[in-house]
Image (cartoon, helix red, strand yellow):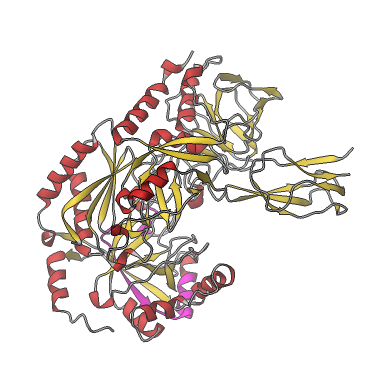
Amino acid sequence: MATEVRTQTAGNMWKVLVKPGDTVAEGQVLFIMEVMKMEVAHEAPVAGVVSAVHVAEGAEGLDAEDLVVEIG
Amino acid sequence: MTTYAQPRYLPGGDRYMLIEFGNEMNLELNFMAQGLAGAIVANKVGGVIETAPCFASMLVHYEPDDISFADLQTEMERLIGSLGPSDDIELPSRLFYFPTVYCDPWTKAAIDDYTAKINPEKEYDPAFVARLNGLSGPEQLVRVHSGTEYWVAALGFWPGLPFMMALDPRCVITAPKYNPPRTWTPQGTVGMGGASTAIYPVATPGGYQIFARIPVPIWDPKQRFDVFADSICLFRPGDRVKFVPVSVAEFEDVERQVADGSYTYNVVEYQKFSVAQYKAWVSRLDRSKRF
Amino acid sequence: MIEVIKPGLETAVQDWPGRIGFWNQGFPPSGPMDSWSFRLGNVLVGNAPGAAGLECQYLGPTLRFVDAAVIALTGADMGAKLDGVAVPLWESVAVAAGQVLALGPAKSGTRGYIAIAGGIATEPWLGSRSTFHQAGVGGIGGSALKVGHEIPIGPGNGTAGRRVKPEARPVFSTDKRWSVEVCAGPNDDWIDAAGQQRFLSADWKLSSKSNRTGFRLEGPDWTFAEKAYDKPPEHGSLPSNIIDHGYPLGAINLAGQTPIILVNDGPSMGGFINPYTVPQAAFWKLGQSRPGDIYNFRQVSVERAQAMAREMKALCTQASIL
């Protein structure tokens, strides 16, 4: 059962740092959103292999709780 | 006409009035603005919450529950009428001397960063400003810019940030603003936009042409020095500033004194600024001669 | 006392009307962007409408209530839970000592407000508890909330179970469009007739490059009247450049061709014109909108804008509480 990593807030996708197949450690930054000119880093809650990335870098107008990365 | 025969009273939303005295950078207009600000306080005008004088204008923040825009305008007209000619104005005026490195490495780094990331066409600011004003180069820019006292006409844009005007007309230069603005400016930077000189109290974005830096804080939330006893902002409108060219080594020495708290501000506090005497002096100057 | 477990995106102590009287030194008023929701929250818990509370933006905080309290949540719905149980908005709620209040992302609207009976009791700074964190002013040690901050609360007189009448609550847009009131001026005469028409009829998109310092708008180009070109050179070279002047709060500041609405933490003066100004009573719409939303500006007279503020002030009283 894949671990889902979702957006914590509405905003833009500033940087996507992983792609499917990447091995990530727990706590590793997977993607960084930008909202109110602030960076919001999203970290992997578990170690594992990225199985899917659903949002591209530069995507704008995301909602909170949009699915971005799946691990495992 | 660049000084209006009658000031213009312009609404700013439901709670602000902008009073325009004229259309140019003219010290007299600032004397009028500062004079009116003082008169409003002295007369305790009902419904006025606060005022913010600027170069040629003044913003009034009022409480609409206490006074209407129309009644406020009537009251302002009455006060302005009672002020008399600006020639009669005499203001106590402190004079600050600041050690200043012109064409310094820190503003150069900010300019280099801007040309690398935002606009590769940007000409190095000291050379650019010198060229636009018909000066022979950065060295003359230093002599001309540092050759005058500056009058603090207003504070704003950022807490404690002074907007200053050259008092010696032979030293008046102008500079366009960055388009688009820089995303950062070193703290203590001295820069120019239009005909005004400003000092950046902290590292903020900005659009002024930049060409010098001072090591002395003009804003101190911790109030470590005596000059900040009454406020965390050093300046008041009506202060004057003299930039004294120094070397990087002297700058760093002052920086150390500021860091360890031993620095003593160089401020002259016994002078009164007389508008009449100032105007008489200006009329005797040969404005065609630059330093 | 309240302990901060998670700070949220940018959560800060604010009071109303904010830090007033220091505009001429460059201090913005700060304070809550949606003062309608903010004031009603205070009234719900028995505070003066302007008492210090928390403004939460986009993503709310998680707070532990060390002492029992009466609180109210207003503004954006951030899915608040008290020890895991959902907390209603627009109602005063009893919190027992030790309970944890967790707010999530804003679902409708953008800014949520937490009022606590007794008000936040930090040391005021230049007359206000409002936070201007960019300059290290007010709030808790000059900043927005951080993990581990302890928020002091004053003695309060709140009653749980009070509700704001539904008709007294702001209604947020559900179609990402907002009709926002503006007053003409101070510098509307720098814009030509076609430009004024264009401003008032166009769709203006709120840019993501926006925060409490300024709300940047994307839309059509502005066209200027004669006086924007026929001016002494010291104004600056762009038609929207003017000799530096004081900025009204809410001014639509035209930086080149980019309109930026100057909001609660914005600059007090500068060298660009302000052709229109958003009045105080319309600020809540700015505060509850988010990037991508469209503004259509509707011109109102100064007198009408003043009446709107008076109406809102009358609404933010016990008369609106059941």
Location of residue B120 (image quadrant): bottom right
**Residue C215 seen from this side:** yes
Is B172 covered by the magenta stretch? no
Q: Nearer the viewer, residue C3 or A67?
A: A67
Total number of numbered discs in the rendering: 0
Q: Is residue C78 left or right of residue B213?
A: right
Q: Nearer the viewer, residue C204 or A12?
A: C204
Q: Is residue B254 above or below residue C1?
A: below
Q: Residue at x 60, y 25 (%)?
A: C67
What is the x, y in percent for residue C98?
Answer: 66, 26
* Quadrant location of the N terminus of chain C in the rendered image: top right
As drawn, B230 above or below C310: below
Residue B96 in which image quadrant: bottom left
Q: Nearer the viewer, residue B229 or C221?
A: C221
Q: Residue furthest bottom?
A: B136
- The verdict on residue B247 being magenta is yes
Quick check: C98 above or below A54?
A: above
Using the rendered image of the protein, determine whether residue B235 is visible from the camera's viewpoint. no
Residue B176 horizontal/vertical position (percent): 39, 69
Give left or right: position of C278 versus B256: left
Which segment is the magenta one? Answer: B226-255
Q: Quadrant of residue C94?
A: top right
**Residue farthest to the front, as pictured:** C194
Q: Position of residue A15 (x, y in %)?
A: 70, 54
**Residue drawn at (45%, 72%), measured in percent from left and top?**
B254
Q: Is residue B268 above or below residue C43?
A: below
Residue that appears at 36% across and 30% down: C309
